Image (tube, helix red, strand yellow):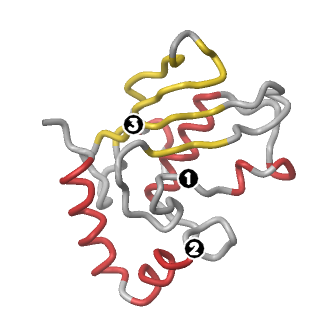
Amino acid sequence: MNTEDTTIIFIDPIDANYLHLEATITGPMSTPYENGIFLLHIKLSEEYPYQPPQSIIFKRATMHPNIDEYGNFKSELLKLEFWSPTMTIKDILEHVWARLAIPNIDSNECDPTRAQSYRMDRSQFEIEAREYAIKYAYAT
């Protein structure tokens, strides 16, 4: 996957607080998220870049094995043992984008119910994910 295809629309601090960022990315092509616009809230640690982000939250409903029902993005990237202080905000967003394209269902970093649905009937899961994207991630 070519991360040069990642489309980051914008990144801005929330209320001039550089530890709380709002970012918007587009969904990867040839996935159920294609043409979707995804609004994220990134909460950075005061120790950033030496500590990973505290949380990455999808602000609108998104059906994905690595996103729980509350929008919390689950990834090894948010664990200290996998974090590198050289990771930039752009790197973080590229990781989120890549994970949208290729879920990680073989780790503890997934929503168990959604991962099971993905494993059992991937085509049905992708239909539902596409319906979510159309309903919640398309500009109106």
Q: Quadrant of residue 129?
A: bottom left
Give how far across and how far down residue 29 sits, in percent: 31, 51
**Upstream in sequence: badge 2 or badge 1:** 1
Q: Quadrant of residue 8?
A: top left
Identify the secondary structure beneath mark 1: loop
- Are the residues tagged 2 and 3 within 8 Å (C-beta)? no
Q: Answer left or right for 111 relative to 84.
A: left
Give how far across and how far down residue 66 sits, in percent: 53, 62
Which residue is located at x 61 percent, y 38 percent?
92
Q: Amino acid at mark 3?
A: Leu
Reading the image, the residue beneath label 2 is: 105
Q: Amino acid at mark 1?
A: Phe
Reading the image, the residue beneath label 1 is: 73
Which residue is located at x 55 percent, y 70 percent?
111
Reading the image, the residue beneath label 3 is: 39
Question: For this rendering, which residue is in front, 130 or 29?
Answer: 130
In which quadrant is the C terminus drawn? top left
Give how far across and how far down residue 54 sits, in percent: 70, 40
Identify the secondary structure beneath mark 2: loop
Question: For this rendering, which residue is in front, 81 or 20?
Answer: 20
Give how far across and how far down residue 86 sits, in percent: 79, 30
